[in-house]
Amino acid sequence: MSKYFQGLLARRQQSLNCDFETEMIFSPKHLNHIAGLLVYYNYDNHYYLKMSRAPEGLFLAVNSLVNRELTDSEPVYLEEGTASVRLRAQIRTEELQFWYSTDGDEFRPVGPVLDMKNISDEHIQGNGFTGSMLGVNCSDLQGDGCRAEFIYLSYRECQLPVSK
């Protein structure tokens, strides 16, 4: 059992072309408060669009963990006082792009386009599972009661145009 306060809510990814979106209200106080949207295979293999706070301010970044190799994207700093943020994972066959919006209308990309083959049975080294999941997460690694509110979760399968 973890001594930290953590929560994960996830659903199975059922299509190679889908959007998963949430609106999150979160007020992290420091780097040990993290919340966001996950494309998750297992503990050692996932992509995480996370919000946290560094000394420079409130930020979003993409955390990539592939066969235990960790990389982080450049942070995108948000205006202080941002009340809520919408987060989206857009999956198109083998590519994943994370997006965010602070006004609910204009979405901007966060981090690089990621390879969904890394979150598959064929790529995982040991510890196989039943496929990727899409979810939301909140972790209070300080243990002082920080929480995130997720206003809604939306999963939508997308039909791509058939090329002639």
Image: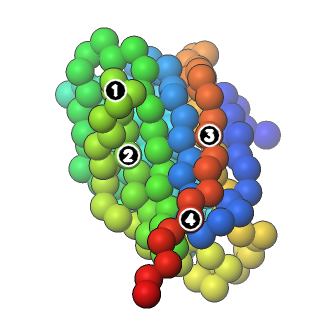
Residue at 30%, 49% in the rendered image: 109
Disc nearest the viewer among 4 and 1: 4
- Tell me, yes or no, whether the two marked residues, 3 and 1, touch with CB atoms within 8 Å: no
Q: Is residue 44 above or below residue 121?
A: above
Q: Please identify, in this view, whether the residue under mark 3 or under mark 2 is nearer the observer.
A: 3
3D distance between C-alphas at marks 2 and 1 = 11 Å
Can the viewer see residue 96? yes
Residue type at mark 1? Thr
Q: Where does label 4 land, which residue?
A: 159
Q: Which residue is mark 3?
A: 154
Tell me the CA gap for discs 4 and 1.
27 Å
**What mark, if any, has residue 144 been given in the picture?**
none
Between discs 4 and 1, the one toward the N terminus = 1
Horizontal side of residue 48 vs 108, given as left or right: right
Q: Secondary structure at mark 3?
A: strand
Q: Residues within 10 Å of mark 1 (few under 14, many from 20)?
A: some
Q: Closest to the observer: 76 or 86?
A: 86
* Left or right: 58 as drawn, with respect to 17: left
- Res 102 label: 1
CB contact under 8 Å: marks 2 and 4: no
Question: Disc 2 to disc 4, how far (Cα)?
Answer: 19 Å
As helix, strand or loop, the secondary structure at mark 2 comes to strand
Residue 69 shows up from this direction: no
Query: In terms of sequence position, does the residue under pointer 3 or pointer 4 come before the other?
Result: 3
Reading the image, the residue beneath label 2 is 99
Q: Which part of the image, by quadrant, shows the N terminus? A: top right
The figure's colour scheme reads rainbow
